[in-house]
Amino acid sequence: MDPDPITKATYIKVYLALLALLAATVAAVFINMGPFNILVTMVIAITKALLVMLFFMHVRYSPRLIWIYASLGVIWLTYLIGGTLTDVLTRI
Amino acid sequence: MSDKELSHQFETLDQQADAATLGIWAFLATEVLFFGGLFMLYTVYRFKFPAAFVECSKLMDLRLGAINTAVLLTSSLTMAFAVHSAREGQKNSTVGWILVTMLLGSVFLGIKGLEYYHKFAEHLVPGPYFQLDSPNRREAQIFFSLYFGMTGLHALHMIIGLVVLAVIAMMTSAGKFSKTYSNPVHIAGLYWHFVDIIWIFLFPLLYLIGNR
């Protein structure tokens, strides 16, 4: 393989960002934001997952075909959960 | 580059590396769906029994859960270092970082086991001995079934990851990899990070519902 396009310093920055997001999501549990609590926790989780994928998993520096494959699982999962909810949430 | 590094069906090492990376991502897409069924069940039941889910989430050990998340994120960093070293052709530091990653993975499983022990001791395991003084007693068992099912499947993936890393560490120290060829280290790393991402979602979905 070619040498790693990402430096160790970048990995450490990403790691510190992940720890900061972890602290933020735990802190958010103690603040009552009503229905926005779940929104905040999920946005933070998705951001953490994207950081891991783009840097630790090198997707940012990978061919476009890898971007498509990395998105596929998420797209199918959206169909799976979304399709099921159209039934479950609209039952009378 | 030696003939041992390039399999006969490939033209170049780059092509071989791209094929290996594409293969593991295809596998990871099926893994997303493997866990996906459980995430779907979770979503349906959380919509159906929101009060029970909030009540049960408060019974989770937030401190141990947060520590475990930090442990797993750290293991992803050390895994990224291992792959980085492998691509530089540094054998010893690759093995070293893989061993640190395995140690952190084992710490995660240990803490998880401690949490399971607490849940057993508190009679929060679904079944005839489930005890919860609440009108949501029945629905609460659905939450704990999902808790044990999802974290159990995740823990199984961690155990498989530890076995994979042990093999990769042995292959590395046996000198199977070089600066031009380290695909197996890279692929094992992608699997390890994927298991980390599953936990990144399990933690808020199980531990962080409702206010404390």
Image: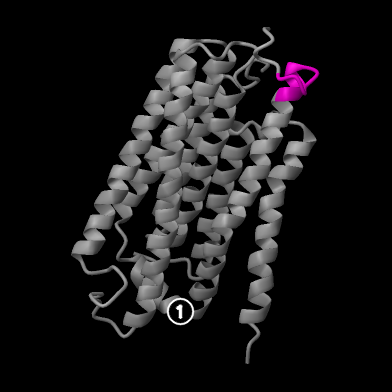
Q: How many marks?
A: 1
Figure check: B168 above or below A47: above
Can you give x and y, in whole percent of width and height, for residue B60 in the image? 32, 61
Query: Would residue B50 appear left or right of B35 to someone viewing this image?
Result: left
- Tell me the quadrant of the picture where the C terminus of chain B can be found: bottom left
Residue identified by numbered label 1: B49
| Residue B31 visible, this angle | yes
Figure check: B60 above or below A1: below
The residue at the point 61 percent across, 45 percent down is B28
> Considering depth in this image, is A53 or A84 the residue closer to the camera?
A84
Which residue is the extreme one toward the top? B1
Q: Quadrant of residue B119?
A: bottom left
Query: Circle 1 — which element?
Result: loop
Can you give x and y, in whole percent of width and height, for residue A58 in the image? 64, 31
Can you give x and y, in whole percent of width and height, for residue B20 in the image? 68, 30
Q: Three-letter amino acid code at disc 1? A: Phe
Can you give x and y, in whole percent of width and height, for residue A71 in the image? 71, 48
Residue A8 painted magenta:
no
> Considering depth in this image, is A16 or B101 the residue closer to the camera?
B101
**Highlighted magenta segment, given as a residue range:** B7-16
The kind of secondary structure the magenta stretch mainly shows is: loop
The residue at the point 70 percent across, 64 percent down is A79
Query: Would residue B22 appear left or right of A92 to someone viewing this image?
Result: right
Which residue is the extreme one toward the left? B121
> Considering depth in this image, is A1 or A27 the residue closer to the camera?
A1
> Considering depth in this image, is B204 or B141 the residue closer to the camera?
B141
Residue B13 painted magenta:
yes
The residue at the point 50 percent across, 57 percent down is A41
